[in-house]
Image (tube, rainbow, N blue to C red):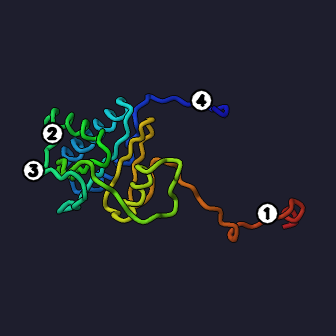
Amino acid sequence: SDGAFQSTNRRPSLIRLKEVLQEWPLSPEGRRSLFHSISYIVTAAGEGKYGCTIIVDPGEPPLHLPGQIIASPLRLMPMEHLRLAAALAKVDGALHIDANLNLRAFACLMDGPSIPGEDRGRGARYNSALRFTAAHPSLVVVVVSFDRPVSVIQNGVDFSQPPVWPPIPEKMQTPPALADWLKK
């Protein structure tokens, strides 16, 4: 592509999620289990070719979200619970997972006011996550598109995309001509 070689192992990159989890006050085992569980759900969605959204909530107490609240949060540690969570990810809306590895709700609605940087080409799931995390900066949202792109969003910013730096024309100076430079 454009004269450059690129390869992929078709696995989503969740490096930013791993970095965010490093900042949370979790035990190494808790951090590893949370990352593994989210990775499992993301991989299941990618392989099943369906989109999903996962809200990862470090709050104590966790945020109350509109959706299908689970009366007694479901611990994701047994594999059958993790498989159930991956199946529930097929339902419209987001999964709400807390930092203690509990599925608190599914089919959750995310809303927020419009923000700069939205990408109408990415769809409602993606833009809702941007808006929602802008309104709730402590949360991390992982968005899996049905055609496999995975975005890790926090504080209204998609960390899966390279940063776009705006030009700063007032700071830029025209370089001197070579003859003028040599006179110095």
| Distance Cα–Cα, label 4 vs label 2 | 40 Å
Q: Earlier in the sequence, mark 1 or mark 2?
A: 2
Q: Is residue 147 left or right of residue 95?
A: right
Instruction: Give coordinates of residue 78: x percent, y percent.
Output: 13, 36
Q: Residue 77 got which mark?
A: 2
Instruction: Give coordinates of residue 127: x percent, y percent.
Output: 44, 54
- Which callout, 1 or 2, points to the residue nearer the camera? 2
Q: As rendered, which of 125 and 61 lies closer to the eye?
A: 125
- Which callout, 1 or 3, points to the residue nearer the camera? 3
Q: Is residue 111 left or right of residue 167?
A: left
Which residue is denoted by mark 1 in the rendering?
Answer: 175
CB under 8 Å between discs 3 and 2: no
Which residue is denoted by mark 4 in the rendering?
Answer: 5
Q: Residues within 10 Å of mark 3 (few under 14, many from 20)?
A: few
CB under 8 Å between discs 1 and 2: no
Q: Amino acid at mark 2?
A: Met
Q: Earlier in the sequence, mark 3 or mark 2?
A: 3
| Distance Cα–Cα, label 1 vs label 3 | 66 Å
Q: Amino acid at mark 1?
A: Pro
Assign the C terminus to one quadrant of the image. bottom right
